[in-house]
Amino acid sequence: MYVEFNNKIVVSEDIKNIIEKNTEFKVLKDMSKGSKREDILAFNLSVDINTLNDLMEEEVDLNELTEDDLFEEYLSLAEEIAMDIEEYVPEGAIMDIKSYKWDKSDNAIKLIIIIAPEDLYEVKLRDIMKKLITQVE
């Protein structure tokens, strides 16, 4: 899918490859078409639990956390490190990231990332995220 950011055409496949090459995230699915918008890119991502554990070990004793606390830590850490993707998004773009699931069968946290033009209203971005979350659940 092609999207224009500041008069520059961006191919979703290129962004997918950049994310996988430069971050700890795996792109599970290009959700751009599922957004029913032609001005955004959206991806379903996953990050391995072991990666998150390695990052958390220095600050938290994982054995002391309840499963609910661990779940919350995983979700927030996944969103936090996903912000590093901002370095690779086109100029004039904003991002929204939402982690939504601890997939124990894949041993990973699943997330959705939306990359949109900076003139898209935050309220609209949240509406798009809600729509995409329902598609993956």
Image (cartoon, helix red, strand yellow):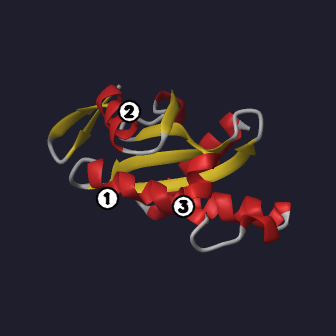
The amino acid at mark 3 is Leu
On screen, residue 19 versus residue 29, left or right, reads left
First reached walking from the N terminus: tag 3 or tag 2: 2
Element at label 3: helix
Q: Position of residue 75 (x, y in %)?
A: 65, 58
Q: Which residue is mark 3?
A: 55
Q: Going 28% across and 55% down the picture, which residue do you hit? A: 87
Q: Which residue is mark 1?
A: 119
Q: Residue furthest bottom?
A: 59
Q: Going 67% across and 35% down the picture, which residue do you hit? A: 135
Relative depth, front residue between 121 and 78: 78
Identify whether 75 is placed above or below 110. below
Identify whether 70 is placed above or below 64. above
Quarter the C terminus occupies: top right
Element at label 1: loop
Distance from label 2 to label 1 (Cα)?
Answer: 23 Å
Contact flag, marks 1 and 3 (Cβ < 8 Å): no
First reached walking from the N terminus: tag 2 or tag 1: 2
Q: Position of residue 125 (x, y in %)?
A: 49, 55
Distance from label 1 to label 3 (Cα)?
Answer: 34 Å
Distance from label 3 to label 2 (Cα)?
Answer: 23 Å
First reached walking from the N terminus: tag 1 or tag 3: 3
Element at label 2: helix
Q: Quadrant of residue 9?
A: top left
